[in-house]
Image: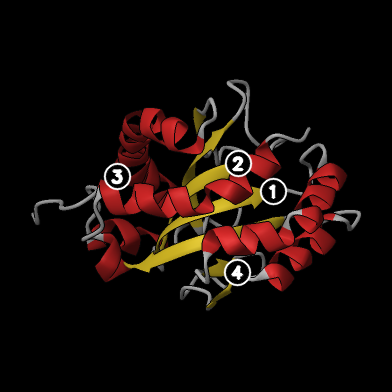
Amino acid sequence: MKKPTGLGFTPADFAIFKIDDFNARLQEIDARVRPRLARLADELTPELARRLHRDLYPHLARHARRTVDPPRETWAAFGPSPKGYKRYGHLALCVSGAGLHARIVVKPEAGGRSGMALELAKNALELARSLGGTRVARYEKWEFDALPAPAVADDAFFTSLAEELGRKTGGFDVGFGWNVRDATRLDRAELLDACRELAPIYRIVSGVV
């Protein structure tokens, strides 16, 4: 067996998402990927909290409600409440067949979306300056088979996110992705640096409920 490197993931972990059988894929996620995510979440939470200047609580994805269509990704979420994360803007470390992802997510069921939209629109130029031309991908409609193409996070990017949150069932999902080859070589410092770059977005969407 190939010895895990970097964050502990191997190509076999990402290949799980190519398993067609529903139960077989869930079993492999629970046996291989979920334990790695749980360990990483425990290890990374203190440092992420320090870098984001926020209290953070880790949560692992639960796929128990699914009966058809096996999950195309799984994740550890980091949010401001110990009781759950879906009602808040949150940071997510996701694993899919395409690779590894660090993302900021606001689900349609999150509270305070109108307030988040106002803050994003008001701070669009400052957010763009904070990211300094960094390219960020949008994941709302991606197909899971390949990483979505990133775009420069300029003020128009953040204005677009604000507009999306202003819709009745709006949300957004943005961040960075590493393909399988790069994900198996990624180390904690690189992952934490990526999360630090997303910190200005997280501070806005996690602080409005």
Q: Looking at this rendering, what residue extends furthest in the top direction? A: 82
**Marks 3 and 2 in Cβ contact (< 8 Å):** no
Q: Give the residue at x 36% y 47%.
A: 192
What is the CA distance from the residue labelled 2 to the residue labelled 4?
A: 19 Å
What is the CA distance from the residue labelled 4 to the residue labelled 3?
A: 34 Å
The disc labelled 3 sits on which kind of residue? Answer: Arg
What is the CA distance from the residue labelled 3 to the residue labelled 2?
A: 24 Å
Q: Quadrant of residue 162?
A: bottom right
* Quarter of the rendering occupied by the C terminus: top right
Q: Which mark is residue 153?
A: 4
**Marks 2 and 1 in Cβ contact (< 8 Å):** yes
Q: Give the residue at x 60% y 41%.
A: 90
Indicate which disc, 3 or 2, sits on the residue closer to the N terminus: 3
Q: Which residue is mark 3?
A: 32
Q: Give the label, 2 or 4, closer to the camera.
A: 4
| Image location (x, y in percent) of residue 52 | 50, 37
Q: Nearer the viewer, residue 1 or 22?
A: 1
Per the image, label 4 sits on a secondary structure element best described as loop
The disc labelled 1 sits on which kind of residue? Answer: Val
Q: Is residue 45 above or below residue 23?
A: above
Q: Give the residue at x 77% y 68%.
A: 160
What is the CA distance from the residue labelled 1 to the residue labelled 3?
A: 27 Å
Q: Nearer the viewer, residue 53 or 162?
A: 53
The disc labelled 2 sits on which kind of residue? Answer: His
Q: Which residue is mark 1?
A: 106
Q: Which mark is residue 90?
A: 2
Left or right placement of residue 30 versus residue 127 in this view: left
Q: Which mark is residue 15?
A: none
Q: Is residue 195 among the parts visible in the rendering?
A: yes
Q: Give the residue at x 66% y 64%.
A: 140
| Image location (x, y in percent) of residue 138 | 61, 67
